[in-house]
């Protein structure tokens, strides 16, 4: 019960820290209006955030091996929350960039690897699937609940209370920021320090040796490739809104309903996949999920333009369920990498650097394809390419499973 209470604390922390950073998902137009900035300026902030993430993945892993994840997570929440209070003042664009740099450090350098390592250490070898499934599914549920409250509160202030857009948005920002500041001390109270990463042998003199040890493990490369392929399948879902509107002529309201319904597949898919991975073989479950997710994404482009909204909803929900299931279990492959707790953070940093690299190149590929092949053709090529990568990921998962099985006596 104590371990599951700590897992629940990590789930809440993981679900609390990102919604304010990605406030544009629900309030993009209101953000632009309230801050007096253009869409290109807002995009610059998020591009800078992505660069910071990529640059800090490795240092984040190194830091997590030397400082207790409990403290790193708590400090990250406090830092992100305080920056949120500054964000609520709706400063100028130059100050806004400083805030986003701070958020990049708080959610990338000090938070991400600490969260993954804390869950990996908390769960036993036969619990990795369900623990990571609960983490991803639980985070999605927390984010959905917070977003529901935020949107309802914003609508009430704007429509019923007669507040301006900027005043209503300021309350939403305060809501997210204060929630993070409340969760921070709870993390310190409920989480244990876990295995110490400050052993005498873990010094700066060993960094290169540790890196060589991590990079020399083929299991680490296979796990990273599994996450790379699975994350690319998930990236395809970001294009569903525009694809449905442009190809099937659906209204923005209808598309919004379908894409929001897809979000509720996250806790179902992630948790189910995690539990299945523990009862069966996690790499086998991941491989089959990658295959089925790839095939369902490929099948989506075969749905005729004359089809009804019901069939489209079913297909989108199926793709969402499977891609969230993949996300729910792919970090459980860390257990099969046979990396000691002392350098597990460094391994997480290496895997994250490779696995989440689509954040850099997929937007460029997507834009280039749609420019070269306007309309449905561009999406067909894009989705087909990502589906093929999913199949390669299944092969990597299968290979990783065989290596792990051969190592088990």
Image (cartoon, helix red, strand yellow):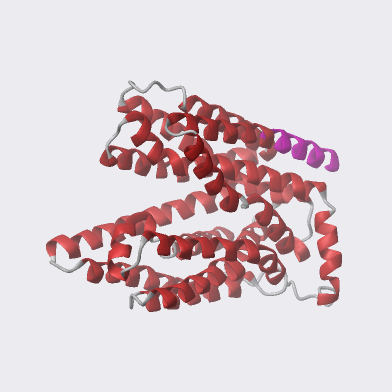
* Front position in the image: 246 or 131: 246
How many marks are shown on the rendered structure? 0
Q: Residue drawn 59% across and 38% down?
A: 276
Image location of residue 267, percent across then percent down: 46, 46
For the stretch drawn in magenta, what is the main secondary structure? helix
Whether residue 298 can be seen here: yes
Q: Is residue 12 left or right of residue 365?
A: left
* Front position in the image: 215 or 2: 215
Image location of residue 148, percent across then percent down: 31, 55
**In the rendered view of the protein, which quadrant contains the N terminus?**
bottom right
In the image as oriented, which residue stretches furthest toward the front? 372
Q: Residue drawn 80% across and 75% down?
A: 199
Q: Quadrant of residue 253?
A: top left
Q: Quadrant of residue 398?
A: top right
Image location of residue 79, percent across then percent down: 50, 76
Q: Residue drawn 83% across and 77% down?
A: 200
Q: Is residue 361 above or below residue 277?
A: below
Q: Is residue 313 left or right of residue 371?
A: left
Q: Which residues are magenta?
A: 394-409
Q: Residue drawn 24% across and 62% down?
A: 154
Whether residue 285 can be seen here: no
Is 162 contained in the magenta span? no
**In the rendered view of the protein, which quadrant contains the C terminus?**
top right
Image location of residue 317, percent across then percent down: 42, 34
């Amino acid at each position: 019960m104590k371990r599951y209470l700590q897992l629940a604390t990590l789930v809440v922390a993981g679900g609390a820290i990102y919604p304010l950073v990605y406030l544009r998902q629900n309030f993009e137009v209101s953000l632009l209006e309230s801050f007096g900035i253009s869409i290109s300026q807002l995009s610059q902030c998020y591009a800078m955030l992505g660069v910071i993430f990529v640059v800090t993945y490795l240092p984040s892993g190194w830091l997590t091996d030397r400082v207790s994840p409990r403290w790193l997570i708590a400090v990250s929440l406090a830092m992100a929350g305080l920056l949120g209070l500054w964000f609520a003042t709706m400063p100028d664009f130059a100050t806004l960039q400083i805030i986003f740099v701070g958020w990049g450090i708080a959610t990338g350098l000090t938070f991400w690897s600490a969260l993954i390592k804390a869950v990996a250490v908390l769960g036993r070898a036969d619990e990795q699937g369900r623990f990571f499934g609960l983490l991803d599914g639980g985070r999605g549920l927390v984010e959905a609940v917070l977003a529901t409250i935020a949107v309802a509160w914003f609508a009430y202030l704007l429509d019923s209370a007669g507040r301006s857009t900027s005043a209503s948005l300021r309350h939403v920002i305060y809501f997210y920021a204060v929630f993070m500041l409340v969760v921070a001390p709870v993390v310190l109270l409920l989480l244990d320090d876990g295995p110490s990463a400050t052993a005498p042998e873990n010094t700066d003199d060993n960094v290169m040796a540790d890196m060589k040890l991590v990079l020399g493990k083929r299991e680490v490369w296979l796990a990273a490739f599994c996450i790379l392929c699975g994350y690319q399948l998930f990236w395809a879902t970001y294009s569903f809104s525009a694809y449905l509107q442009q190809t099937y002529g659906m209204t923005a309201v209808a598309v919004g309903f379908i894409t929001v319904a897809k979000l509720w597949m996250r806790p179902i898919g992630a948790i189910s996949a995690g539990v299945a991975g523990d009862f069966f073989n996690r790499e086998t479950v991941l491989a089959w999920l990658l295959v089925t997710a790839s095939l369902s994404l490929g099948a989506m482009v075969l749905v005729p333009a004359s089809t009804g909204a019901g069939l489209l909803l079913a297909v989108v929900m199926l793709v969402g369920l499977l891609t969230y299931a993949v996300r729910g279990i792919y970090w459980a492959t860390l257990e099969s990498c046979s990396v000691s707790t002392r350098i597990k953070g460094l391994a997480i940093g290496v895997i994250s650097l490779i696995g989440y690299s689509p954040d850099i190149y997929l937007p460029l590929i997507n834009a280039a394809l749609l420019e070269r092949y306007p309309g449905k053709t561009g999406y067909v090529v894009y989705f087909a390419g990502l589906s093929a990568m999913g199949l390669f990921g299944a092969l990597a998962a299968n290979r990783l499973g065989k290596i792990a099985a051969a190592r088990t006596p």
